[in-house]
Image: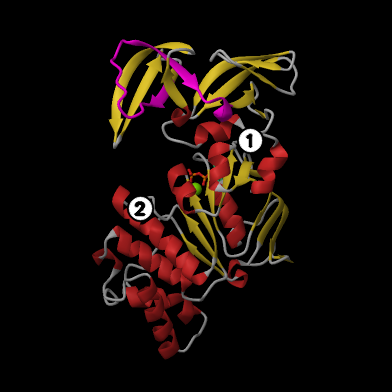
C-alpha cells in the first residue's frame, strides 16, 4: 500500500496539531514519524488509522481516497503506546481477538494466531495472561494481534517507549525483521532520532504540526534542509559558528572563505562533531572537558554559551584548560539563514540532494 497525504490538517479547538501535511509513503517501506513532544505525530497516525477525520485535506491508500472510511474498513493494524492488551484474556485469546470480531471460524483463527505468535517468537507463552509477561513479550503480543488479520498497513505509536534500552534495541530490530518479512507498509512514531534513523527507509520529521523534512536517514543527517533538522538530528549535537556573507563570499571563523549565491547577511555555520579536528590554525578555543564515549574521546571546548564538540583522533591528547585550535572540514560545513532556512553552497545544490532521496 502506498499512503498519500494531501494537504492534511487537523485543528482542535485551540491548536493546529497538523498543518497542511503532504507526503507520499512508498509501498512496503518502514517510515518513521519523528519529532519533539506535541509536534503532531500521534495525531497524524490517528488520521491514518481513521480514528480522527482530518479537518482539511485527504488521505489515499493506493490512490483510493479513504479520508472518510472508518478504521475497520481501512485494512490497518495498529499498536498503541501502552499495548492495550486485554488483561483477562490469554496471549492466544488476545491474538485471536480481531479474528473473532470478524467472525472467523475458531479453528482457523487459532491456526492463524499461532502462526503470528511464532513469527514474533512468543508461541511458548500462549496460555499466559498479559500480567505474567515482560514488557517486551507484551509488546510482541500486541504486534502479533495487530498483524493477525494481515493488514496492508501497520501503524505503531511509540511501541518501544516502555522498554529498557537493551530490549528497545532488540525489539526495534525485531520490528524491522517482521516488517521486511511481510513487506508491510509501516508507519512508526517515535521521538527518538537514533531509533528512527536506524530502522527507517524514510523519516518524516515534524515540528509544531509542520513537515520539516521527508527524506532518507542519510540525508536527514548530512543534508538537513533547515536548522531545526540539523539540531534535532545527531548526538552529540551539531556545532554552530557565526559567519557572514558579504558580496557572495561566506566568511568563516576557520580562516577560509567560500563563494555562495546569497544576499549579504549574517548566517549560522553548522558542522557535525566528526568533521571538526585539532589543528594549528583556525578557531582558538579553551578545553572545557574531555569525556570518553565508548571507544571515542569527546572534547568540549569554548564557553558555557558557545560550546563546540568534537572527537579526538587516535594518539591525540588534550587537557582541561588547554588552549587549542580547531578546524572544520570545508566540505562538511552547512549554512543556515538566521531564520533557519538552508543556504546551499556551490556543489551542495538542493536539486542534487532531492535526486538522491
Ligand atoms: N484531542 C485533542 N484535543 C485538543 N488538542 C489535542 C488533542 N490531541 C492532541 N492535541 C494537541 O495537538 C498537538 C499534537 O499532539 P500529538 O498527540 O499529535 O503530539 P505527539 O507528537 O504525538 O506528542 P508526544 O511525543 O508527546 O506523544 C499537541 O499540542 C496536543 O496538545
Ligand atoms: Mg504521541
> Ligand 1 is in which quadrant of the figure?
top right
Q: Residue 280 at x, y = what percent? A: 43, 13
Q: Is mark 2 within 8 Å of ligand 1?
A: no
Which residue is pictured at 43% across the width and 76% down the height?
97
Mark 2 element type:
helix
Position of 139 with respect to 208 (left or right) is left
Using the rendered image of the protein, determine whether residue 106 is visible from the camera's viewpoint: yes
Using the rendered image of the protein, determine whether residue 9 is visible from the camera's viewpoint: no
Q: Earlier in the sequence, mark 2 or mark 1?
A: 2
Count of numbered circles on the image: 2
Which labelled disc corresponds to residue 169? 2
**Toward which corner of the image does residue 94 lie, by quadrant?**
bottom left
Mark 1 element type:
loop
Which labelled disc corresponds to residue 225? 1
Q: Is residue 280 magenta-colored?
A: no
Q: Nearer the viewer, residue 236 or 39?
A: 236
Report the span colored magenta.
308-333
**Toward which corner of the image does residue 91 lie, by quadrant?**
bottom left
Q: Marks 2/1: CA distance?
A: 29 Å
Using the image, determine if residue 290 lies above or below residue 323: below
Which residue is pictured at 41% across the width and 24% down the height?
309
Which residue is pictured at 45% across the width and 61% down the height?
176
Q: Residue 278 at x, y = what percent? A: 41, 20
Q: Residue 112 at x, y = what percent? A: 43, 82
Amino acid at each position: 500500500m502506498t499512503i498519500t497525504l494531501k494537504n492534511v490538517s487537523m485543528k482542535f479547538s485551540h491548536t493546529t496539531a497538523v498543518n497542511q501535511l503532504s507526503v507520499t509513503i512508498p509501498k512496503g517501506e518502514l517510515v518513521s514519524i519523528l519529532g519533539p513532544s506535541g509536534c503532531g505525530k500521534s495525531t497524524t497516525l490517528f488520521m491514518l488509522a481513521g480514528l480522527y477525520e482530518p479537518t482539511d485535506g485527504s488521505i489515499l491508500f493506493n490512490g483510493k481516497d479513504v479520508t472518510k472510511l472508518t478504521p475497520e474498513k481501512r485494512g490497518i493494524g495498529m499498536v498503541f503506546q501502552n499495548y492495550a492488551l486485554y488483561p483477562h484474556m490469554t496471549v492466544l485469546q488476545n491474538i485471536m481477538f480481531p479474528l473473532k470480531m470478524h467472525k472467523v471460524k475458531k479453528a482457523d483463527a487459532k491456526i492463524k494466531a499461532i502462526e503470528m505468535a511464532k513469527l514474533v517468537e512468543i508461541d511458548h507463552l500462549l496460555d499466559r495472561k498479559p500480567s505474567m509477561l515482560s514488557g517486551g513479550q507484551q509488546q510482541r503480543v500486541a504486534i502479533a494481534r495487530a498483524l493477525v488479520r494481515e493488514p496492508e498497513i501497520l501503524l505503531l505509536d511509540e511501541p518501544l517507549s516502555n522498554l529498557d534500552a537493551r530490549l528497545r534495541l532488540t525489539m526495534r530490530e525485531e520490528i524491522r525483521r517482521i516488517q521486511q518479512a511481510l513487506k508491510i507498509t509501516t508507519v512508526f512514531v517515535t521521538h527518538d532520532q537514533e531509533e528512527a534513523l536506524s530502522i527507517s527507509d524514510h523519516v518524516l520529521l515534524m515540528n509544531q504540526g509542520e513537515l520539516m523534512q521527508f527524506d532518507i536517514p542519510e540525508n536527514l543527517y548530512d543534508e538537513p534542509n533547515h536548522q531545526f533538522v540539523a539540531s534535532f538530528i545527531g548526538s552529540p549535537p551539531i556545532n554552530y559558528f557565526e559567519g557572514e556573507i558579504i558580496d557572495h563570499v561566506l566568511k568563516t571563523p576557520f580562516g577560509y572563505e567560500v563563494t555562495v549565491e546569497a544576499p549579504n547577511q549574517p548566517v549560522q555555520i553548522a558542522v557535525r562533531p566528526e568533521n571538526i579536528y585539532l589543528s594549528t590554525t583556525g578557531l582558538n578555543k579553551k578545553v572545557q572537558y574531555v569525556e570518553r564515549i565508548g571507544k571515542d574521546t569527546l572534547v568540549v571546548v569554548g564557553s558555557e554559551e558557545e560550546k563546540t564538540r568534537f572527537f579526538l583522533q587516535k594518539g591525540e591528547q588534550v587537557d582541561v584548560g588547554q588552549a587549542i585550535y580547531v578546524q572544520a572540514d570545508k566540505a562538511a560545513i552547512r549554512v543556515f539563514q538566521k531564520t533557519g532556512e538552508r543556504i546551499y553552497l556551490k556543489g551542495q545544490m538542493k536539486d542534487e540532494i532531492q535526486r538522491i532521496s
